[in-house]
């Protein structure tokens, strides 16, 4: 019978924690959420020497304070769930700052194992780390690993198992200066007598009280011994204790490092040399823009042949099905409804996969923090953090994970604003609408038109953030404290895992909804309006004003008439709320083009719609109500229907206003009509 | 208007390629705690590497790694004035 243990993975950001997690769990992992909060929780399983390990990937943190959601999640998991083992992944090339977290994990009294990662890079830097000495000093097992190649993972797993069956509690505790120790001991005595605190490691809790940790103070206030605690705390200056505790933790680390390795902080690293160019005063911005452009080009150029293949395959499948099924309505349902629906889900997969692959390269290489460094000035202008730039970039792939990525932003106001404006960043699902309309109306200039729409989305997002910062979400800017990690060569493996993870989320989240939407359109377009005398699913009423769908469109037509839109566009837009790419599918049905996009483009270009209306429609699709999946995530991440509805009304109002401007101005001066 | 001692400066005023010693972190609790956690404790040597292309934030090197702070945060870090004050 296999034993089962829980292993938590902790560590600073950018230390290769994810690659260690991937190397341990392989493909057996799933992504969820931490209960009550919206921080992503990754879990995976691994059986090693007959022991089943449940591996939990804690959020990457530098410390365990109460000032960031990630840090609270990590420390609460350790305290509440009491994992059997905590593995801290430590970047061997940056021991001093990494070990700061180690001191806190040890104070938490966990059974710790250190994975000394990037040991290959340590060697290449000419630094020698004496692991045995380090192990002896910390009283914690230390195992060398190379996450990117999986070296040392076996040894790490052996050590985890060995350590988990070892009943002794050990691990060095660090001593602070006398007066801190005296206070800490006083507090420890109070805590140990009160069963209310039985749950918490008393030394850690005492030190946190001395540091003035708000979260811990709040917990202490609920106890009966609080007056005694307060008595100890009242006689000291928490600010100076906080600073001295941090200082002495670093002091202890420095003392140890002098014995354990030869630190070489003064030499110029490869990263520094790269940064001389990449974040250079004159070259930084052009390089940034060209990299963004290159990522874009790769994503869309490489995807084209795959998209064509998918397109051809589903068109063929649809035709075959229609010819095989003799019942009219059934062949129409399957051929024009379901198969077309599945096709319109899959057709964007190449784009989404490639975009996330590119984002993963930028993230793993360390460039994305340079992007935040370069762009922070712009973001701070509108009251946001350079880090808000990252979710906004992700928004180009899909707003759903982008909104989820806002959890890296510590300040809740910054986070809320970023969530509210991210839907204006043109996601991959909006692209097919532009491709269709710009392709149909603007021929060779289609690329320019599409690029302008992306630019418009960015502009609207930035201006809206500025507006919200000054009105509904006024307040002090959050601090900007960001590491610029060393550049690393991103691995193909990690890129592929990341890409696949996101692809899966897209298929799961969007797939069903899109399919339902397309079949829904088919149904509504096939159900005759009562009294019209039409027959269900007959070609005569399909998508005409005699169908239910047409009737709904007619009803709301007056609302969009000032934008030059007719009832068919109104219907397509309604269904676009299910998922924006459905706009294309439904237009295909409504304009009688079926599943063939080229046919649809031909019909539109031949006069079914004017180029001006097409342009206004693209602007409208860019800004109006995001898709259901996106609405769901906004609700989840903001935790408020009020803000969710605010986003929907604000966006749709803006969409209407700008499309109105495009159409009215254009037709006045006789442009594109 | 500045009542600081002449041998004290705030980190935002230090020019690139100059390295200084941290004296004290002032400022609001949440940002001060983060700054301390990142290793900017009293006595630490910090080198100013460069300013971002648009002038802000600023990149620093300390404890063998690179950190960026906005000038606003750097203003909350008191440092020893360098030997030759750039004028």
Image: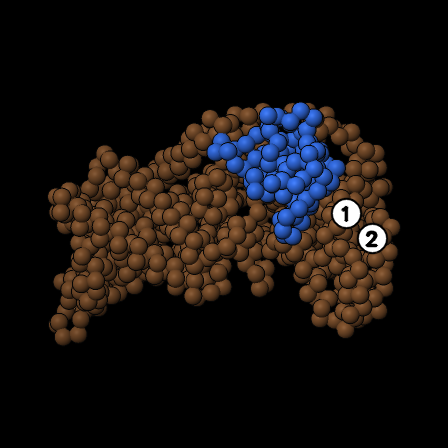
Give the numbered dot on residue A244.
1
| Chain letter, disc 1 residue | A
Of the image marks 1 and 2, the number of the one nearer the N terminus: 2
Mark 1: few, some, or many residues within 10 Å (few <14, many ≥20)? many
Residue located at (36% from left, 60% from top): A648
Task: State the hue of chain A.
Answer: brown
For label 2, the SS is helix
Q: Is residue A150 above or below residue A407?
A: above
Query: Which corner quadrant holds the C terminus of chain B?
Result: top right
Left/right of residue A434 with respect to residue A371 in the rendered view: left
Task: Tell which of A21 and A185 is nearer to you.
Answer: A185
- Asked if the residues shown at circle 1 and circle 2 are in contact, with their CB atoms under 8 angstroms apart, the answer is yes
Q: Quadrant of residue A288?
A: top left
Q: Is residue A98 above or below residue A416?
A: above
Residues marked 1 and 2, same chain: yes
Task: Tell which of A481 and A102 is nearer to you.
Answer: A481
Give the numbered dot on residue A180.
2
Q: Quadrant of residue A225?
A: bottom right
Left/right of residue A381 with respect to residue A547 in the rendered view: right
Task: State the hue of chain B.
Answer: blue
Instruction: Tell me where residue A92 appears, x and y as whole percent.
Output: 71, 36
* Residue A616 visible at all: yes
Query: Which corner quadrant holds the N terminus of chain B?
Result: top right
Residue lying furthest front in this view?
B1
Q: CA distance from mark 1 to mark 2?
A: 9 Å
Instruction: Tell me where residue A430 appears, x and y as whole percent.
Output: 33, 49
Residue located at (45% from left, 43% from top): A381
């Amino acid at each position: 019978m296999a034993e089962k243990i829980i292993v938590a993975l902790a560590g600073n950001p950018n230390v290769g924690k994810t690659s260690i997690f991937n190397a341990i769990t392989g493909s057996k992992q799933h992504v969820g959420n931490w209960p009550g909060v919206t921080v992503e929780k990754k879990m995976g399983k691994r059986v090693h020497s007959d022991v089943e390990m449940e591996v939990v990937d804690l959020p990457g943190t530098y410390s365990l304070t109460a000032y960031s959601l990630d840090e609270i999640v990590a420390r609460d998991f350790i305290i509440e769930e009491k994992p059997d083992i905590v593995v801290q992944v430590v970047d061997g090339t940056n021991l001093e700052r990494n070990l700061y977290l180690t001191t806190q994990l040890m104070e938490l009294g966990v059974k710790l194992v250190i994975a000394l990662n990037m040991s290959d890079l340590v060697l290449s830097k000419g630094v020698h780390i004496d692991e045995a000495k380090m192990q002896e000093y910390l009283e914690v097992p230390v195992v060398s690993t190379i996450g990117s190649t999986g070296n040392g993972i076996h040894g790490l797993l052996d050590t985890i198992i060995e350590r988990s069956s070892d009943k002794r509690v050990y691990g060095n505790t660090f001593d602070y200066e006398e007066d801190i120790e005296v206070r800490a001991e006083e507090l420890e005595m109070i805590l140990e007598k009160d069963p209310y605190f039985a749950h918490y490691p008393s030394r850690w809790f005492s030190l946190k009280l001395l540091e003035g940790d708000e979260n811990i103070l709040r917990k202490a206030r609920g106890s009966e011994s609080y007056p005694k605690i307060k008595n100890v705390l009242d006689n000291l200056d928490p600010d100076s204790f906080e600073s001295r505790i941090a200082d002495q933790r670093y002091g202890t680390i420095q003392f140890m490092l002098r014995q354990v390795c030869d630190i070489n902080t003064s030499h110029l690293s490869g990263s520094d040399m790269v940064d001389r160019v990449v974040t250079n005063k004159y070259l930084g911005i052009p390089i940034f823009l060209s990299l963004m452009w290159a990522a874009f080009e790769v994503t869309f150029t490489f995807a084209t042949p795959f998209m064509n293949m998918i397109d051809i395959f589903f068109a063929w499948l649809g035709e075959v099905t229609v010819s095989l099924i003799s019942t009219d309505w059934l062949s129409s349902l399957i051929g024009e409804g379901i198969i077309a629906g599945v096709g319109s889900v899959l057709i964007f997969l190449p784009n989404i996969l490639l975009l996330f692959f590119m984002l993963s390269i930028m993230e793993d290489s360390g460039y994305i923090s340079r992007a935040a460094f370069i762009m922070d000035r712009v973001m701070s202008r509108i009251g946001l953090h350079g880090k808000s730039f990252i979710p906004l970039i992700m928004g180009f792939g899909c707003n759903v994970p982008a909104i989820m990525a806002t959890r890296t932003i510590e300040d809740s106001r910054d986070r809320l604003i970023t969530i509210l404006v991210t839907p204006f960043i043109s996601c991959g699902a909006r692209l097919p609408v532009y491709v269709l309309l710009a392709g149909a109306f603007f021929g060779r200039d289609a690329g320019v038109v599409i690029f302008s729409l992306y630019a418009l989305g960015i502009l609207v997002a930035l201006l809206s953030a500025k507006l919200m910062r000054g009105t509904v979400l006024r307040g002090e800017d959050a601090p900007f404290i960001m590491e610029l990690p060393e550049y690393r060569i991103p691995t193909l493996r990690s890129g592929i895992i990341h890409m696949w993870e996101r692809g899966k989320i897209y298929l799961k989240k969007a797939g069903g909804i899109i399919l339902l939407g397309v079949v829904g359109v088919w149904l509504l377009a096939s159900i005759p309006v009562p009294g019209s005398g039409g027959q269900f699913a007959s070609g005569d009423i399909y998508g005409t004003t005699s169908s239910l769908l047409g009737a709904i469109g007619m009803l709301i037509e007056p609302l969009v008439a000032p934008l030059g839109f007719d009832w068919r566009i109104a219907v397509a837009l309604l269904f676009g709320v299910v998922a924006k790419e459905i706009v294309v599918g439904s237009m295909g049905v409504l304009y009688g083009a079926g599943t063939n996009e080229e046919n649809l483009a031909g019909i539109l270009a031949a006069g079914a719609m004017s180029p001006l209306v097409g342009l206004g429609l693209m602007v409208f699709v860019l800004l109006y109500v995001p898709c259901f999946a996106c609405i769901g995530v906004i609700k989840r991440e903001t935790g408020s229907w009020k803000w969710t509805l605010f986003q929907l009304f604000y966006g749709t109002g803006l969409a209407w206003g700008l499309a109105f401007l495009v159409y009215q101005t254009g037709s006045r001066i006789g442009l594109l009509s | 208007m500045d009542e600081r001692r002449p041998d004290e400066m705030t980190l935002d005023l230090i020019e690139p390629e100059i390295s200084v010693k941290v004296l004290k972190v002032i400022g609001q609790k949440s940002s001060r705690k983060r700054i301390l956690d990142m290793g900017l404790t009293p006595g630490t040597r910090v080198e100013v590497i460069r300013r971002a292309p648009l002038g802000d934030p600023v990149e620093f090197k300390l404890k063998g790694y690179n950190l960026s702070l906005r000038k606003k945060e750097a203003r909350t870090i008191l440092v020893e004035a360098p030997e030759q004050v750039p004028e």
